Amino acid sequence: MTSVQLVLFGAAGDLAHRKLLPALYDLYREGRLPAEVDIIGVDLAEMDSDSFTAFACDAADTLGRFFPKDVDADSWTAFAQGLSYVQGDATKPETFERLAAHLDETAPEGERPERVYYLSVAPFLVDPIVTGLSTAGLLADVDRDRFVVEKPFGRDIESARALDKVLLQTADERQVYRIDHYLGKETVQNLLAFRFANALFEPIWDARYVDHVQITVSETVGVEHRGGYYEKAGALRDMVQNHLLQLLCLVAMEPPVAFQADEVRNKKVDVLKAVRPITTDRIHEVAVRGQYGEGYLAGERVAGYRQEPKVAPHSTTETYAALKLEVDNWRWHGVPFYLRTGKRMPRRVSEISVQFRPVPHRAFPSGADEAWQPNRLVLRIQPDEGIVLRFQAKRPGPSMLLRPVSMRFDYEDAFETPPDAYETLLLDAIRGDATLFMRADQVEQAWKVVDPVLQAWADSPPAEFPNYASGTWGPAAADRLLARDGRAWFEPLPPDATPPGIAPEAVADAGK
Ligand code: BG6
Protein backbone atom coordinates (compact mmCIF):
# COMPACT_ATOMS: atom_id res chain seq x y z
CA MET A 1 0.00 0.00 0.00
CA THR A 2 1.08 3.55 -0.58
CA SER A 3 1.70 5.91 2.29
CA VAL A 4 -1.20 7.15 4.40
CA GLN A 5 -1.91 10.39 6.19
CA LEU A 6 -4.55 9.85 8.84
CA VAL A 7 -6.01 13.07 10.16
CA LEU A 8 -7.75 12.79 13.50
CA PHE A 9 -10.24 15.58 14.20
CA GLY A 10 -11.07 15.69 17.91
CA ALA A 11 -7.59 14.34 18.60
CA ALA A 12 -7.54 15.59 22.20
CA GLY A 13 -10.96 14.09 22.96
CA ASP A 14 -12.26 11.12 24.85
CA LEU A 15 -12.69 8.70 21.93
CA ALA A 16 -9.24 9.47 20.56
CA HIS A 17 -7.67 8.79 23.93
CA ARG A 18 -9.75 5.78 24.89
CA LYS A 19 -9.97 3.97 21.57
CA LEU A 20 -8.43 5.48 18.45
CA LEU A 21 -4.87 6.21 19.54
CA PRO A 22 -4.42 2.89 21.39
CA ALA A 23 -5.91 1.04 18.39
CA LEU A 24 -3.55 2.80 15.97
CA TYR A 25 -0.50 1.98 18.04
CA ASP A 26 -1.59 -1.63 18.49
CA LEU A 27 -2.07 -1.98 14.73
CA TYR A 28 1.33 -0.47 14.14
CA ARG A 29 2.94 -2.68 16.75
CA GLU A 30 1.54 -5.75 15.01
CA GLY A 31 2.81 -4.54 11.66
CA ARG A 32 -0.69 -4.20 10.23
CA LEU A 33 -0.52 -0.52 9.34
CA PRO A 34 1.20 0.55 6.13
CA ALA A 35 4.88 1.21 6.77
CA GLU A 36 4.52 4.88 6.00
CA VAL A 37 1.69 6.21 8.09
CA ASP A 38 1.49 9.68 9.54
CA ILE A 39 -1.09 10.56 12.16
CA ILE A 40 -2.00 14.19 12.33
CA GLY A 41 -4.08 15.30 15.31
CA VAL A 42 -6.36 18.33 14.91
CA ASP A 43 -8.16 19.88 17.85
CA LEU A 44 -8.98 23.16 19.49
CA ALA A 45 -6.96 22.13 22.56
CA GLU A 46 -3.69 24.01 23.08
CA MET A 47 -1.14 21.32 22.25
CA ASP A 48 1.81 20.96 19.96
CA SER A 49 3.25 17.89 18.30
CA ASP A 50 5.32 17.01 21.38
CA SER A 51 2.45 17.23 23.83
CA PHE A 52 0.17 15.36 21.41
CA THR A 53 2.77 12.60 21.20
CA ALA A 54 2.87 12.43 25.01
CA PHE A 55 -0.96 12.28 25.06
CA ALA A 56 -0.94 9.43 22.50
CA CYS A 57 1.76 7.60 24.44
CA ASP A 58 -0.31 7.84 27.61
CA ALA A 59 -3.34 6.47 25.72
CA ALA A 60 -1.41 3.54 24.26
CA ASP A 61 0.28 2.96 27.59
CA THR A 62 -2.85 2.81 29.67
CA LEU A 63 -5.39 1.44 27.20
CA GLY A 64 -3.53 -0.36 24.44
CA ARG A 65 -3.14 -4.10 24.11
CA PHE A 66 0.66 -4.13 24.11
CA PHE A 67 1.93 -1.13 25.90
CA PRO A 68 3.36 -1.25 28.55
CA LYS A 69 3.02 -5.00 29.13
CA ASP A 70 5.23 -5.58 26.14
CA VAL A 71 7.08 -2.31 25.83
CA ASP A 72 8.95 -2.11 22.64
CA ALA A 73 10.74 1.19 22.77
CA ASP A 74 11.84 0.92 19.16
CA SER A 75 8.36 0.43 17.83
CA TRP A 76 7.02 3.29 19.95
CA THR A 77 9.80 5.61 18.77
CA ALA A 78 9.15 4.71 15.14
CA PHE A 79 5.38 5.16 15.60
CA ALA A 80 5.82 8.46 17.43
CA GLN A 81 7.89 9.87 14.57
CA GLY A 82 4.76 9.87 12.45
CA LEU A 83 2.70 11.86 14.98
CA SER A 84 2.12 15.58 14.61
CA TYR A 85 -0.49 18.13 15.63
CA VAL A 86 -2.30 21.05 14.08
CA GLN A 87 -4.09 23.24 16.61
CA GLY A 88 -7.17 24.94 15.26
CA ASP A 89 -10.85 25.69 15.29
CA ALA A 90 -12.67 23.33 12.94
CA THR A 91 -15.24 26.00 12.12
CA LYS A 92 -12.60 28.39 10.71
CA PRO A 93 -11.35 28.13 7.11
CA GLU A 94 -7.78 29.04 8.15
CA THR A 95 -7.51 25.78 10.09
CA PHE A 96 -7.96 23.86 6.84
CA GLU A 97 -5.45 26.04 5.01
CA ARG A 98 -2.88 25.29 7.69
CA LEU A 99 -3.80 21.63 7.63
CA ALA A 100 -3.41 21.49 3.85
CA ALA A 101 0.03 23.10 4.10
CA HIS A 102 1.03 20.70 6.88
CA LEU A 103 -0.11 17.66 4.87
CA ASP A 104 1.88 18.82 1.85
CA GLU A 105 5.00 19.49 3.95
CA THR A 106 4.91 16.17 5.75
CA ALA A 107 3.90 14.00 2.77
CA PRO A 108 6.64 11.56 1.83
CA GLU A 109 8.37 11.94 -1.51
CA GLY A 110 6.81 10.15 -4.42
CA GLU A 111 3.24 8.99 -4.87
CA ARG A 112 0.50 11.14 -3.34
CA PRO A 113 -0.54 9.55 0.00
CA GLU A 114 -4.02 8.24 0.72
CA ARG A 115 -5.78 10.57 3.14
CA VAL A 116 -8.23 9.40 5.76
CA TYR A 117 -9.98 12.03 7.87
CA TYR A 118 -11.49 10.65 11.06
CA LEU A 119 -14.17 12.94 12.48
CA SER A 120 -14.21 12.06 16.16
CA VAL A 121 -16.20 15.19 16.94
CA ALA A 122 -19.60 16.40 18.13
CA PRO A 123 -22.27 16.00 15.40
CA PHE A 124 -22.58 19.76 14.81
CA LEU A 125 -18.94 19.90 13.64
CA VAL A 126 -19.33 17.33 10.85
CA ASP A 127 -20.77 19.76 8.33
CA PRO A 128 -18.13 22.53 8.90
CA ILE A 129 -15.28 20.03 8.81
CA VAL A 130 -16.35 18.34 5.58
CA THR A 131 -17.04 21.73 4.00
CA GLY A 132 -13.65 23.02 5.23
CA LEU A 133 -11.84 19.97 3.84
CA SER A 134 -13.58 20.28 0.52
CA THR A 135 -12.94 24.02 0.18
CA ALA A 136 -9.25 23.47 0.93
CA GLY A 137 -9.15 20.85 -1.86
CA LEU A 138 -8.51 18.06 0.64
CA LEU A 139 -11.26 15.76 -0.66
CA ALA A 140 -10.51 16.22 -4.33
CA ASP A 141 -9.27 12.71 -5.03
CA VAL A 142 -12.30 10.41 -4.84
CA ASP A 143 -10.16 7.27 -4.84
CA ARG A 144 -7.62 8.39 -2.25
CA ASP A 145 -9.41 10.82 0.07
CA ARG A 146 -12.12 9.60 2.41
CA PHE A 147 -13.55 10.43 5.79
CA VAL A 148 -15.03 8.54 8.69
CA VAL A 149 -18.05 10.00 10.49
CA GLU A 150 -18.85 8.90 14.02
CA LYS A 151 -22.38 8.16 15.14
CA PRO A 152 -24.95 9.41 15.88
CA PHE A 153 -25.30 10.48 12.27
CA GLY A 154 -27.75 13.36 12.66
CA ARG A 155 -30.36 13.67 15.43
CA ASP A 156 -33.34 12.34 13.51
CA ILE A 157 -34.24 11.45 9.97
CA GLU A 158 -34.52 15.07 8.82
CA SER A 159 -31.12 16.12 10.12
CA ALA A 160 -29.52 12.89 8.83
CA ARG A 161 -30.90 13.63 5.36
CA ALA A 162 -29.75 17.24 5.57
CA LEU A 163 -26.30 16.10 6.63
CA ASP A 164 -26.14 13.61 3.80
CA LYS A 165 -27.10 16.32 1.37
CA VAL A 166 -24.21 18.50 2.55
CA LEU A 167 -21.77 15.60 2.50
CA LEU A 168 -22.79 14.47 -0.93
CA GLN A 169 -22.55 17.97 -2.34
CA THR A 170 -18.93 18.08 -1.33
CA ALA A 171 -17.91 14.42 -1.61
CA ASP A 172 -18.84 11.18 -3.29
CA GLU A 173 -20.75 8.45 -1.37
CA ARG A 174 -17.68 6.23 -1.86
CA GLN A 175 -15.69 8.68 0.29
CA VAL A 176 -18.13 8.63 3.25
CA TYR A 177 -17.51 5.98 5.93
CA ARG A 178 -20.30 6.08 8.53
CA ILE A 179 -18.98 4.12 11.47
CA ASP A 180 -20.82 1.95 13.96
CA HIS A 181 -18.10 0.33 16.02
CA TYR A 182 -20.33 -2.65 16.87
CA LEU A 183 -19.85 -3.84 13.30
CA GLY A 184 -16.11 -4.08 13.95
CA LYS A 185 -16.57 -6.49 16.83
CA GLU A 186 -15.57 -10.03 15.90
CA THR A 187 -18.53 -11.49 17.74
CA VAL A 188 -20.91 -9.30 15.75
CA GLN A 189 -19.33 -10.33 12.46
CA ASN A 190 -19.53 -13.90 13.64
CA LEU A 191 -23.32 -13.66 13.65
CA LEU A 192 -23.15 -13.90 9.87
CA ALA A 193 -20.80 -16.87 10.02
CA PHE A 194 -22.90 -18.60 12.64
CA ARG A 195 -26.13 -18.18 10.72
CA PHE A 196 -24.97 -18.65 7.14
CA ALA A 197 -21.99 -20.99 7.34
CA ASN A 198 -23.90 -23.63 9.31
CA ALA A 199 -26.85 -25.62 8.12
CA LEU A 200 -28.16 -26.44 11.56
CA PHE A 201 -29.94 -23.31 12.74
CA GLU A 202 -31.18 -21.54 9.62
CA PRO A 203 -34.06 -23.97 8.99
CA ILE A 204 -35.49 -23.22 12.44
CA TRP A 205 -34.64 -19.50 12.41
CA ASP A 206 -38.18 -18.21 11.94
CA ALA A 207 -41.61 -17.68 13.44
CA ARG A 208 -42.44 -21.37 13.39
CA TYR A 209 -39.70 -22.16 15.92
CA VAL A 210 -38.64 -18.88 17.51
CA ASP A 211 -40.86 -17.52 20.25
CA HIS A 212 -39.10 -14.17 20.68
CA VAL A 213 -35.70 -12.52 20.68
CA GLN A 214 -34.12 -10.35 23.38
CA ILE A 215 -31.21 -8.02 22.73
CA THR A 216 -29.54 -6.59 25.81
CA VAL A 217 -26.69 -4.10 25.85
CA SER A 218 -26.10 -3.10 29.44
CA GLU A 219 -23.26 -1.01 30.81
CA THR A 220 -22.05 -0.46 34.33
CA VAL A 221 -20.53 2.91 33.50
CA GLY A 222 -22.51 6.10 33.81
CA VAL A 223 -22.01 9.00 31.42
CA GLU A 224 -18.74 9.90 33.15
CA HIS A 225 -17.34 13.09 31.61
CA ARG A 226 -19.48 12.89 28.44
CA GLY A 227 -22.46 14.65 29.98
CA GLY A 228 -22.28 17.52 27.48
CA TYR A 229 -22.69 15.15 24.55
CA TYR A 230 -25.06 12.74 26.26
CA GLU A 231 -27.54 15.41 27.34
CA LYS A 232 -28.28 16.01 23.66
CA ALA A 233 -28.25 12.33 22.72
CA GLY A 234 -29.83 9.99 25.28
CA ALA A 235 -29.86 6.21 25.12
CA LEU A 236 -32.14 5.92 22.10
CA ARG A 237 -29.86 8.02 19.88
CA ASP A 238 -26.60 6.91 21.47
CA MET A 239 -27.17 3.14 21.40
CA VAL A 240 -30.50 1.95 19.98
CA GLN A 241 -30.57 3.81 16.65
CA ASN A 242 -27.21 2.32 15.77
CA HIS A 243 -25.69 -0.54 17.79
CA LEU A 244 -28.88 -2.34 18.84
CA LEU A 245 -30.57 -1.99 15.47
CA GLN A 246 -27.43 -3.34 13.80
CA LEU A 247 -27.67 -6.41 16.02
CA LEU A 248 -31.35 -6.75 15.16
CA CYS A 249 -30.50 -6.59 11.43
CA LEU A 250 -27.89 -9.32 11.72
CA VAL A 251 -30.21 -11.63 13.64
CA ALA A 252 -33.24 -11.05 11.43
CA MET A 253 -31.81 -10.57 7.90
CA GLU A 254 -32.29 -12.98 5.03
CA PRO A 255 -29.25 -14.89 3.75
CA PRO A 256 -27.18 -12.75 1.39
CA VAL A 257 -26.52 -14.08 -2.10
CA ALA A 258 -22.85 -13.13 -1.77
CA PHE A 259 -20.69 -11.59 0.91
CA GLN A 260 -20.32 -8.30 -0.85
CA ALA A 261 -20.68 -4.95 0.83
CA ASP A 262 -23.85 -3.89 -0.96
CA GLU A 263 -25.49 -7.28 -0.91
CA VAL A 264 -25.13 -7.59 2.87
CA ARG A 265 -26.20 -3.99 3.36
CA ASN A 266 -29.30 -4.53 1.19
CA LYS A 267 -30.43 -7.46 3.27
CA LYS A 268 -29.92 -5.47 6.47
CA VAL A 269 -31.90 -2.49 5.18
CA ASP A 270 -34.74 -4.87 4.31
CA VAL A 271 -35.08 -5.74 7.99
CA LEU A 272 -35.37 -2.10 9.02
CA LYS A 273 -37.90 -1.48 6.26
CA ALA A 274 -39.99 -4.36 7.62
CA VAL A 275 -40.03 -3.06 11.21
CA ARG A 276 -43.63 -2.16 11.99
CA PRO A 277 -43.84 1.62 12.34
CA ILE A 278 -44.46 2.72 15.89
CA THR A 279 -47.57 4.87 15.91
CA THR A 280 -48.13 7.49 18.58
CA ASP A 281 -51.01 5.59 20.16
CA ARG A 282 -48.75 2.53 20.64
CA ILE A 283 -45.71 4.27 22.17
CA HIS A 284 -46.63 3.49 25.77
CA GLU A 285 -47.11 -0.19 24.85
CA VAL A 286 -43.81 -0.63 23.07
CA ALA A 287 -41.29 1.85 24.48
CA VAL A 288 -39.91 2.49 27.95
CA ARG A 289 -37.42 5.10 29.08
CA GLY A 290 -35.47 5.46 32.25
CA GLN A 291 -32.84 7.54 33.98
CA TYR A 292 -30.49 6.29 36.68
CA GLY A 293 -30.59 7.71 40.14
CA GLU A 294 -27.93 7.19 42.77
CA GLY A 295 -27.27 3.68 43.96
CA TYR A 296 -24.61 1.05 44.52
CA LEU A 297 -22.33 -0.67 42.05
CA ALA A 298 -19.82 -3.26 43.20
CA GLY A 299 -20.41 -2.07 46.76
CA GLU A 300 -19.57 1.56 45.93
CA ARG A 301 -22.06 4.39 46.20
CA VAL A 302 -22.43 6.12 42.83
CA ALA A 303 -24.10 9.37 41.85
CA GLY A 304 -27.30 9.70 39.87
CA TYR A 305 -27.30 10.97 36.28
CA ARG A 306 -28.51 14.42 37.31
CA GLN A 307 -25.48 14.79 39.57
CA GLU A 308 -22.99 13.99 36.79
CA PRO A 309 -20.79 16.79 35.41
CA LYS A 310 -22.34 18.88 32.63
CA VAL A 311 -25.79 17.38 33.22
CA ALA A 312 -28.76 19.64 33.97
CA PRO A 313 -30.08 19.22 37.54
CA HIS A 314 -33.57 18.46 36.17
CA SER A 315 -32.45 16.67 33.04
CA THR A 316 -35.06 14.62 31.19
CA THR A 317 -32.49 12.72 29.11
CA GLU A 318 -32.98 8.96 29.16
CA THR A 319 -30.07 6.71 30.12
CA TYR A 320 -32.16 3.57 29.58
CA ALA A 321 -34.38 2.60 26.69
CA ALA A 322 -36.35 -0.54 25.90
CA LEU A 323 -38.36 -1.22 22.76
CA LYS A 324 -40.58 -3.99 21.54
CA LEU A 325 -40.26 -4.23 17.77
CA GLU A 326 -42.03 -6.42 15.28
CA VAL A 327 -40.62 -7.31 11.91
CA ASP A 328 -43.46 -7.60 9.46
CA ASN A 329 -42.27 -10.16 6.98
CA TRP A 330 -42.95 -13.81 6.31
CA ARG A 331 -40.07 -15.10 8.41
CA TRP A 332 -40.76 -13.11 11.56
CA HIS A 333 -44.50 -12.66 11.58
CA GLY A 334 -45.65 -12.45 15.21
CA VAL A 335 -42.17 -12.77 16.77
CA PRO A 336 -41.40 -9.84 19.06
CA PHE A 337 -37.87 -8.49 19.32
CA TYR A 338 -37.27 -6.86 22.68
CA LEU A 339 -34.33 -4.47 22.81
CA ARG A 340 -32.94 -2.80 25.93
CA THR A 341 -29.91 -0.78 26.81
CA GLY A 342 -28.95 1.20 29.85
CA LYS A 343 -26.13 2.76 31.78
CA ARG A 344 -25.27 2.01 35.40
CA MET A 345 -26.74 -1.47 35.29
CA PRO A 346 -25.45 -4.34 37.43
CA ARG A 347 -23.29 -5.92 34.73
CA ARG A 348 -21.64 -5.02 31.46
CA VAL A 349 -23.16 -7.43 28.97
CA SER A 350 -24.08 -7.38 25.30
CA GLU A 351 -25.97 -10.48 24.33
CA ILE A 352 -28.71 -11.73 22.07
CA SER A 353 -31.05 -14.44 23.32
CA VAL A 354 -33.08 -16.37 20.80
CA GLN A 355 -35.84 -18.09 22.70
CA PHE A 356 -37.28 -21.09 20.89
CA ARG A 357 -40.85 -22.26 21.23
CA PRO A 358 -41.70 -25.04 23.68
CA VAL A 359 -41.96 -28.61 22.48
CA PRO A 360 -45.47 -29.30 21.19
CA HIS A 361 -46.11 -32.07 23.70
CA ARG A 362 -44.51 -32.71 27.07
CA ALA A 363 -44.54 -36.45 27.53
CA PHE A 364 -42.57 -36.63 30.79
CA PRO A 365 -44.19 -37.54 34.08
CA SER A 366 -45.35 -34.60 36.17
CA GLY A 367 -42.60 -33.42 38.47
CA ALA A 368 -39.91 -34.49 35.98
CA ASP A 369 -39.81 -31.14 34.33
CA GLU A 370 -40.13 -28.62 37.16
CA ALA A 371 -37.06 -26.75 36.01
CA TRP A 372 -37.93 -27.23 32.38
CA GLN A 373 -37.20 -24.36 30.00
CA PRO A 374 -37.61 -24.14 26.24
CA ASN A 375 -34.38 -24.11 24.24
CA ARG A 376 -32.51 -20.84 24.18
CA LEU A 377 -29.53 -19.78 22.17
CA VAL A 378 -27.46 -17.00 23.68
CA LEU A 379 -25.04 -15.15 21.43
CA ARG A 380 -22.64 -13.37 23.72
CA ILE A 381 -21.16 -10.31 22.09
CA GLN A 382 -19.15 -9.20 25.12
CA PRO A 383 -17.63 -9.90 27.58
CA ASP A 384 -17.09 -13.70 27.88
CA GLU A 385 -17.52 -13.81 24.11
CA GLY A 386 -19.14 -16.98 22.95
CA ILE A 387 -22.30 -18.87 22.18
CA VAL A 388 -24.38 -20.86 24.65
CA LEU A 389 -27.13 -23.31 23.78
CA ARG A 390 -29.51 -24.20 26.59
CA PHE A 391 -31.29 -27.53 26.39
CA GLN A 392 -32.87 -30.11 28.70
CA ALA A 393 -30.99 -33.10 30.03
CA LYS A 394 -31.91 -35.97 32.27
CA ARG A 395 -30.41 -35.53 35.68
CA PRO A 396 -28.57 -38.75 36.52
CA GLY A 397 -30.42 -40.86 39.02
CA PRO A 398 -33.15 -43.42 39.31
CA SER A 399 -36.03 -41.13 38.36
CA MET A 400 -36.65 -39.05 35.30
CA LEU A 401 -35.75 -35.51 36.35
CA LEU A 402 -35.02 -32.90 33.73
CA ARG A 403 -32.68 -29.98 34.14
CA PRO A 404 -31.62 -27.25 31.73
CA VAL A 405 -27.92 -27.47 30.88
CA SER A 406 -25.65 -25.44 28.64
CA MET A 407 -23.43 -26.26 25.72
CA ARG A 408 -20.84 -23.55 25.29
CA PHE A 409 -18.45 -22.20 22.75
CA ASP A 410 -15.86 -19.75 24.12
CA TYR A 411 -13.87 -17.53 21.82
CA GLU A 412 -11.04 -17.48 24.27
CA ASP A 413 -10.59 -21.25 24.06
CA ALA A 414 -10.89 -21.47 20.29
CA PHE A 415 -9.09 -18.37 19.08
CA GLU A 416 -6.60 -15.73 20.09
CA THR A 417 -7.85 -12.53 21.70
CA PRO A 418 -9.69 -10.69 18.96
CA PRO A 419 -8.54 -7.19 17.99
CA ASP A 420 -10.53 -4.26 19.29
CA ALA A 421 -13.40 -3.20 17.00
CA TYR A 422 -11.70 0.12 16.32
CA GLU A 423 -8.58 -1.63 15.07
CA THR A 424 -10.64 -3.53 12.52
CA LEU A 425 -12.55 -0.47 11.38
CA LEU A 426 -9.57 1.88 11.25
CA LEU A 427 -7.72 -0.62 9.14
CA ASP A 428 -10.70 -1.03 6.81
CA ALA A 429 -11.01 2.73 6.41
CA ILE A 430 -7.30 2.98 5.65
CA ARG A 431 -7.59 0.19 3.08
CA GLY A 432 -10.75 1.66 1.58
CA ASP A 433 -13.03 -1.28 2.41
CA ALA A 434 -16.54 -0.03 3.26
CA THR A 435 -18.21 -3.39 3.95
CA LEU A 436 -18.47 -2.81 7.69
CA PHE A 437 -19.59 0.80 7.40
CA MET A 438 -23.17 2.03 7.07
CA ARG A 439 -24.79 3.23 3.92
CA ALA A 440 -26.93 6.37 3.95
CA ASP A 441 -30.22 4.51 3.40
CA GLN A 442 -29.54 2.21 6.35
CA VAL A 443 -28.92 5.15 8.66
CA GLU A 444 -32.15 6.78 7.45
CA GLN A 445 -34.20 3.63 7.96
CA ALA A 446 -32.82 3.28 11.46
CA TRP A 447 -33.93 6.83 12.25
CA LYS A 448 -37.34 5.98 10.82
CA VAL A 449 -37.68 3.23 13.42
CA VAL A 450 -36.82 5.39 16.43
CA ASP A 451 -38.04 8.84 15.31
CA PRO A 452 -41.66 8.43 16.47
CA VAL A 453 -40.45 7.45 19.94
CA LEU A 454 -37.98 10.33 20.10
CA GLN A 455 -40.74 12.70 19.06
CA ALA A 456 -43.26 11.36 21.56
CA TRP A 457 -40.74 11.45 24.38
CA ALA A 458 -39.71 15.00 23.53
CA ASP A 459 -43.38 16.04 23.53
CA SER A 460 -44.12 14.59 26.96
CA PRO A 461 -41.21 15.02 29.38
CA PRO A 462 -41.03 12.26 31.98
CA ALA A 463 -42.41 13.15 35.38
CA GLU A 464 -40.86 10.22 37.21
CA PHE A 465 -37.11 10.55 36.47
CA PRO A 466 -34.88 9.21 37.96
CA ASN A 467 -36.81 5.93 37.86
CA TYR A 468 -34.17 3.29 38.42
CA ALA A 469 -31.41 3.08 40.96
CA SER A 470 -27.84 2.65 39.75
CA GLY A 471 -26.92 -1.00 39.98
CA THR A 472 -30.39 -2.29 39.01
CA TRP A 473 -31.76 -3.67 35.74
CA GLY A 474 -33.79 -0.58 34.80
CA PRO A 475 -37.24 0.82 35.48
CA ALA A 476 -40.17 -1.36 36.56
CA ALA A 477 -42.02 -0.29 33.39
CA ALA A 478 -39.50 -2.29 31.35
CA ASP A 479 -40.54 -5.43 33.19
CA ARG A 480 -44.17 -4.61 32.50
CA LEU A 481 -43.36 -4.26 28.81
CA LEU A 482 -42.62 -7.98 28.67
CA ALA A 483 -45.04 -9.02 31.40
CA ARG A 484 -47.91 -7.78 29.20
CA ASP A 485 -46.87 -10.49 26.74
CA GLY A 486 -46.47 -13.09 29.49
CA ARG A 487 -42.67 -12.92 29.31
CA ALA A 488 -39.76 -11.61 31.38
CA TRP A 489 -36.29 -10.29 30.63
CA PHE A 490 -33.64 -12.96 30.92
CA GLU A 491 -31.01 -12.11 33.44
CA PRO A 492 -27.83 -12.25 31.35
CA LEU A 493 -26.06 -15.54 31.88
CA PRO A 494 -23.20 -15.43 34.34
CA PRO A 495 -19.76 -16.14 32.84
CA ASP A 496 -19.92 -19.84 33.67
CA ALA A 497 -23.40 -20.02 32.11
CA THR A 498 -24.95 -21.56 35.20
CA PRO A 499 -28.69 -21.39 34.62
CA PRO A 500 -30.13 -18.89 37.12
CA GLY A 501 -32.20 -20.39 39.89
CA ILE A 502 -30.59 -23.81 39.57
CA ALA A 503 -28.42 -25.06 42.40
CA PRO A 504 -24.80 -25.43 41.21
CA GLU A 505 -24.70 -29.07 42.32
CA ALA A 506 -27.71 -29.80 40.13
CA VAL A 507 -25.87 -28.35 37.19
CA ALA A 508 -22.75 -30.25 38.05
CA ASP A 509 -24.83 -33.41 38.20
CA ALA A 510 -26.57 -32.60 34.99
CA GLY A 511 -23.30 -31.90 33.27
CA LYS A 512 -21.91 -35.34 34.10
C1 BG6 B 1 -20.72 4.21 22.18
C2 BG6 B 1 -21.64 5.06 23.02
O1 BG6 B 1 -21.12 4.25 20.83
O2 BG6 B 1 -20.76 2.87 22.63
C3 BG6 B 1 -21.26 4.97 24.48
O3 BG6 B 1 -21.56 6.41 22.58
C4 BG6 B 1 -21.18 3.53 24.93
O4 BG6 B 1 -22.18 5.68 25.28
C5 BG6 B 1 -20.32 2.71 23.97
O5 BG6 B 1 -20.60 3.50 26.22
C6 BG6 B 1 -20.40 1.24 24.30
O6 BG6 B 1 -19.49 0.56 23.50
P1 BG6 B 1 -18.91 -0.88 23.93
O7 BG6 B 1 -18.05 -1.28 22.79
O8 BG6 B 1 -18.18 -0.68 25.21
O9 BG6 B 1 -20.12 -1.75 24.10
Image (spheres, rainbow, N blue to C red):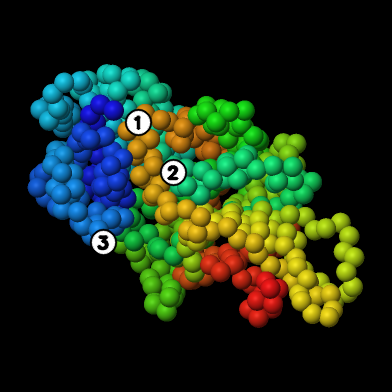
Q: Is residue 243 left or right of 112 when viewed as pictured? A: right
Q: Can you say whether 9 is above or below 487 in the image?
A: above
Q: Give the residue type that dot 3 points to.
A: Lys
Percent position of residue 140, x then y: 27, 18
Quote the CA–CA distance across marks 2 and 1. Answer: 14 Å
Asked whether residue 399 is in view, the answer is yes
Instruction: Return the disc, 2 or 3, that comes first in the chain's sequence.
Output: 3
Position of the N terminus, as image quadrant, is: top left
Percent position of residue 55, x then y: 18, 52
Instruction: Return the disc, 3 or 1, that comes first in the chain's sequence.
Output: 3
Q: Give the residue type that dot 2 points to.
A: Gly
User: In the depicted view, which residue is nearer to us: 245 or 509?
Assistant: 509
User: In the depicted view, which residue is nearer to us: 203 or 356?
Assistant: 203
> Which residue corresponds to mark 2?
184
> Image quarter for residue 40?
top left
Residue under the point 73% across and 54% down = 356
Residue under the point 42% across and 51% down = 418
Of tags 2 and 3, the one toward the viewer is 3
Residue under the point 34% across and 39% down = 426
> Which residue corresponds to mark 1?
431
Q: Give the residue type that dot 1 points to.
A: Arg
Asked whether residue 273 is in view, the answer is no
Instruction: Return the disc, 2 or 1, that comes first in the chain's sequence.
Output: 2
Residue under the point 72% across and 36% down = 329
> Image quarter for residue 397?
bottom right
Q: Secondary structure at mark 2?
A: helix
> Which residue corresponds to mark 3?
69
Quote the CA–CA distance across marks 2 and 3. Answer: 24 Å
Of tags 2 and 1, the one toward the viewer is 1
Q: Can you say whether 286 is above or below 440 in the image?
A: below
